[in-house]
Each structure stands twice: as structure tokens, then as C-alpha cells.
Amino acid sequence: MSEVRVAGTGMTDFGRFPERTGRDLFAEAGLAALDDAGVDPGDVEHVFFGNFMGELAEHQGHMGPLMAEAVGVNAPATRYEAACASSGVAVREAVRSVRTGESDVLLVGGTERMTNMGTAGATEGLSIAADDLYEIRAGMTFPGAYALMARAYFEEFGGDSTDLAHVAVKNHEHALPNEHAQFRSAITVDQVLDAPRIADPLGLYDSCPITDGASAVVLVSEAFAERNGLDASVAVTGSGQGGDKLALQDREYFARTPASTAAAEEAYADAGITADDVEVAEVHDCFTIAEVLAIESLGLYDPGEGLGAARRGETTRHGDVPVNLSGGLKAKGHPVGATGVAQLASITNLLTGTHARSPDVGDLRVGVAHNAGGTVASATVHVLEVVA
Amino acid sequence: MSEVRVAGTGMTDFGRFPERTGRDLFAEAGLAALDDAGVDPGDVEHVFFGNFMGELAEHQGHMGPLMAEAVGVNAPATRYEAACASSGVAVREAVRSVRTGESDVLLVGGTERMTNMGTAGATEGLSIAADDLYEIRAGMTFPGAYALMARAYFEEFGGDSTDLAHVAVKNHEHALPNEHAQFRSAITVDQVLDAPRIADPLGLYDSCPITDGASAVVLVSEAFAERNGLDASVAVTGSGQGGDKLALQDREYFARTPASTAAAEEAYADAGITADDVEVAEVHDCFTIAEVLAIESLGLYDPGEGLGAARRGETTRHGDVPVNLSGGLKAKGHPVGATGVAQLASITNLLTGTHARSPDVGDLRVGVAHNAGGTVASATVHVLEVVA
């Protein structure tokens, strides 16, 4: 099988840009990634694109061809939708395409336009990631669903909102040097605890923001990279995807996310690594409790042990395995369809040393990106390694 | 690479079922396909699922996991959206997954719920398959877009509405023995010509209906089929995908669909066949002119020669290469996300002799399925062959 290399990365600023269309955002990120890779749009053989709710946000489906055109690519394009894991799934399919030898040069990305919907509109739109018949019509919202998961976690393992607050504080601190991040302001544990409650035990600062933005990476075969002298020292060495029942009510546990576990196990086996080899991770922290569940599902912590990781400093930039050095969804922002590829871009740039970050972080060679949809009914994990 | 076999097919009736949810429809089709294959839901490793506009029709995104659960499959699930080519793209990715050896047993399908939106609502919903900024806001509808394509065709090659009417008459006749078809009534050329004009030169009977329905196929590796003694004599031997600019205004020609041509060329090369080897085809006849453009893009006819094919009888059940023996989108119905997989199911059943059809059609060994999205900004072609 062909080895898959990351040849370039690009992203827009993440933030509040209600006047920018999805195609406008993706054009910026996609062209930045192609420029970074030194790849001509004419060389791209397929666009793999993630978007969650363009139908609702800007009355636009069938975005694959639209986005290809936006970056000057004349090739087939496919849109993936797996709620907040949309572009993680796009990455997975792109990796498969290069590995089979079917493709040598792919543009993979995602976009979401959200703030033009207003906060209530975006929250309502996001709800279609859950089960409309059995959750949404019963009044469930995503903060409510993750609050249930946090309560179940506290009941099973102990812990409290202060533990969760440390996750938010850490991710805000991590975002400080990230010029693309939506929030570049330090916060304190007291600020998190004093913030308005959204769905107890989760408050405003336990939640990621509503964000506009786009992200892109150029994936190439090792052979193409070598033939064209590309600077592509990072490989995607592992890929995994997991699934679960869509509605929380149909699951056995609320305090575990087996779809992420399955994705991680598949990705690690694919890469020939174990969780012990992971040096840095970007995980899907749509809420603080989600980061805790993610690092446990990734095998970085045993069940019940992940909650204290940020508080103990282990997942900060000073820790053994820094988590969400980009600021995560919490502080970098979460333009839903763009998030999975943005995580891949962040890990790539961390491994190549081009990520804006504190000098506390030393050389890194193995990172993982974890993207989740809904209440983790969909999850993808990708392993990236420095190979050249 | 592993050879990909079709182990089972299933579909709901296509028609007007406004009270049935997407999951309800897919459960019927998916379980029918699994039953037909003799495969247990527990053996399915991934669900590849196509849907176009569940967000608008039933306030539901993230349908992959929902559909897996609906058929009792506990495995990852991915939703593809490429407008009317949504499940054609899902097939393509599923084929890739089996070929790499990553999977042995996949459930591939699609669903669309439309009639609950009403005719005006469904037409409005369908419009998001085109460019919202530059087509829809200018008043374009899909009948209008295909009427433009028909006019461009007539200008370049000659021909008139009577030629197109023969396509509708043929497909209605083909649907007569298809128990799942929405329309099982013969029509005449005069009826087609006398029907109300929708967008000149296209009338009501040049257009496919608005349809609810679901379809599914079980794809397995040859090794799995042999190991488990499955009756799976049809292989997917070729797969291709093409893309084009989303908006008609950005294209060089209206009377050609190069995305379909690219998909066909790729699929034929993949299968090691030429257009001359094709014995039967299911093509994307959302409008009568679309069938003409499709059979030309598939290389079954030279540009300008496809229009008269139905009138001359060449694509009827008595002809050399029967087209849309199922009744096509025109008479079988077009539940958008289900169409691509329904075509694959129809071709499979034609090759195995289990398709309800006229006894005029003899033994067939090579068929193609052609699925298109929007004004053919996305297209997939799959080649199916009897191999055992």
C-alpha cells in the first residue's frame, strides 16, 4: 500500500464571519494548503470535503463540486456528513484512496458557516446531529446531552465541575499563541465556575463556541512527494472509525464512548503503535467532559482517570502528553465541518515544528487526531508520525 | 485486490408514503438485502449510506449511525451526500473498502423522504443541489436547468420533443412488470406531448416524480462469499466518478455531461471493458433529456445520436442495449438518496435473472449503473458482470 503523506495545511481564522459564504471560507483554506504543499490545483485528483449543515445555514447542498470549483480543481469531489466528525470521515476516505494506489494527490477539507444563523438558530441546527424523533422532540439539546454524560461520569467515578474547569483553562491557555484561534484570552478556574450554567454541571465556559471557518490539508502518496521533491515529512500511518447508536437512550453507558475506543484501537493497530507511543493529541472537546471521555477512549487514561489530567497538569503544554495544544474546539473554535481536518493540520504542524506554540513543547514524532460526531455516535482517529 | 461481489439486494416500494420515516424505509430495504444475501447484521463491518436532504425533509442529519441501528448493525456508518448521486458515491467508497481488504461485508444503501414536503416543498428542497448564490436566487429550478440542456441539445444536433417523448413512453412500458415501481401504467407519445409544459421543451411526463423509498445492497469480498457459500455470482468490476462545476453558467457546454463521460471511462478501464461490451444499462433519467445525455456520455451513442435511440427502439426491451428496464427514475420513481443503489440492485437482478421483466430480454452478462447529481456536477458509473 502507498504511504500517505501530509504535504500542506491551510486554515482560515476561526471566528465570527457571518458575511462569508462557505465557498469563500473554503477557497481561502484550500488555496493556502495547496500553496503550502507546493501543489498545483490541476494536480489534485479528488476533493474530499466535510460539511455538516450547509442545507440549513446557507441553503446549499451538493457542496463537493462547489468547493472543488472554489479552489480551481477540475476533478470529482465528495461531500461527507457525519455531524461534527464530517471532515474526520473525509480524511479517512482520502487515506484509503491514496493507499489503494487510486490517487496520488488529494485535497481534503471542511467548512462550516454558523454565526449567520444566530446562536439560537445554530443551536437548533446542531440538534439534527441527534435523533430527531427520540431526542430533539423531547427537548434535548447538545449541552443537555453532554451534561447527562458528565453527570453519569461523576456518579460512576466521582469528580466535579472544578475538574472540568481545568480543561477549559488549559485549552484557553493553549490557544494564546494560535493566530487562527477564536479565543485568545486566558481564563481562570473561578471564571469558569462563575459563568452562567448552560446545563448543569456544564456552564458557558465548558462549551465550545459557535464558529465560522474552514480547513484543508493536501494528502499525497509517498511516491508523488519524492518525485516532486515535496517537503512532506509527516505520514498518516493509522486510520480508524467507530460508530454507536445515535440516541443516548439506546446505549448501555453514558460515561464511555466506545465509538472513539473502536476508532483508536483500529488506528493504533493500523499504525503499529500503542497508546503509550502517543506524544501529543488533538481531541474533540466540544464540551470539557468530551475531552475527558476522549482521552480515556484513546487509551491515554484508564476510565475514571482522565478527569484529573488537566488539573494535574499532565495534558497541559508542560505535561507528558499535551492535549489540544491548538486550543481545541473550546478555544480555537468549532466550525463543525472544518474541525476534523483542522485537527489533522494542527498535529502536522506540531510534528513539523511550524505550529504556533509555547517553547515548552519539545520535539514530537507521534500525534493523534480524534474527531467525534453527535454524542460520539461517529468517531474517527488518525495517527500521524514523522517519517522523513 | 479483493473482488467485490453483490450478495443481496433489497428495496421498498417506490411511491407516496408521507407517513414513513427515513429510518423506517431503510430498515425495510436493508433487512431485505441482508435476508436476500443470507448475511447476519452482526457480520456487517460498515454501513455506507446515501441521503440528500434529510435535514430539510425530516430535520435529521447524521443519518449514518441512525440507519445502522435501524437494521441492527453495530458498526461504523458513513453518510454520503452528492445530491441525486448520493448513494452512487456510497457504492464507490464501499467498493474501495472491499478492494483494499479493509472490509469483507458491507451494507450499502440510501433513503429519501420527499412527499411529506409537498410538491412545492420538495422542488424547493431539490434546488439546494444547484448553486444557491448564482442559480437558485436567479429563479432556476431543476426542470428549468434540464430544459436549458434540452434546448442546447436541439440547437446543436436537431431533434424535438417527440424524440424525448419516446424515452418516457419506453420507461413507463419497462416499469410495467416492476412491482416496486411508482408508475405501472403505459403512456403514449401523444399523452407525453399533450401533458402540461413544465419548462419548455419539457412537460410533466418528461420529468421523474417525487418519491419516497429506500434501497440497499450487500457487498462482500469474493473470499467471504466463497467461505460462506453465498449465492453471489455478480461482481462489481468497475467503478468511476466524475465531477463538474456546480453551476451551468460556469460550463462550456450544456448539451454534454463530461462528468458522466469521465466516470464511464474510469469504470470501463477499471473493469477492462469498452462501451461495446455493455449489454444493459440503468441510467439517471431524472428528465427524458438526461437519459439521452447519459447514454451518449456512457459511449453507447455518439453525441447527437442518443436522442433517437428510444424512438428507433434500440434502448427498449427489444433493443440491442435496453436502457432502464426497471422503468428508470421516470417510472420506477426517484427517491433521491436511494436511486444510485436501486440502479445497482436492478442491474444485479437483471444479470441474475431475478429482475421482474419482459421475457423478451435474454441472458445478460455485463451491465452498467449510472447515477448523476444536480445538472451532472457529480456522476458515478459502476460496471457489473456475471463472474460465477
Image: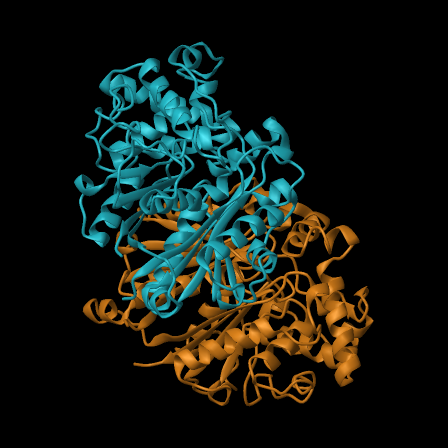
Chain colours: A orange, B cyan
Q: Quadrant of residue B193?
A: top left
Q: In this rendered view, identify the residue nearer to me: A142 or A181.
A: A142
**B115 lies above or below B100:** above
**B41 lies above or below A111:** below
In this image, A166 relative to A241: left or right? right
**B341 lies above or below B139:** below
Q: Position of residue B272 (x, y in %)?
A: 18, 52
* Total numbered labels: 0
Q: Position of residue A23 (x, y in %)?
A: 47, 46
Q: Position of residue A138 (x, y in %)?
A: 78, 53
Task: Answer yes or no: is residue A273 visible.
Answer: yes
Identify the image quadrant of the C terminus of chain B. Answer: bottom left
In this image, A19 relative to B105: left or right? right
Identify the image quadrant of the N terminus of chain B. Answer: bottom left
Q: Quadrant of residue B320?
A: top left
Task: Answer yes or no: is residue A57 visible.
Answer: no
Q: Position of residue B179 (x, y in %)?
A: 49, 35
For the point 49% across and 53% down, which residue is it? B49
For the point 43% across and 30% down, which residue is it? B175
Q: Quadrant of residue B300?
A: top left
For the point 70% across and 53% down, which residue is it? A123
Q: In this rendered view, identify the residue nearer to me: A258 or B320.
A: B320
Q: In this rendered view, identify the residue nearer to me: A86 or A133.
A: A133
**A297 lies above or below A135:** below
For the point 49% across and 39% down, which residue is it? B336
Q: In this rendered view, identify the residue nearer to me: A32 or A365.
A: A365
In this image, A343 relative to B264: left or right? right
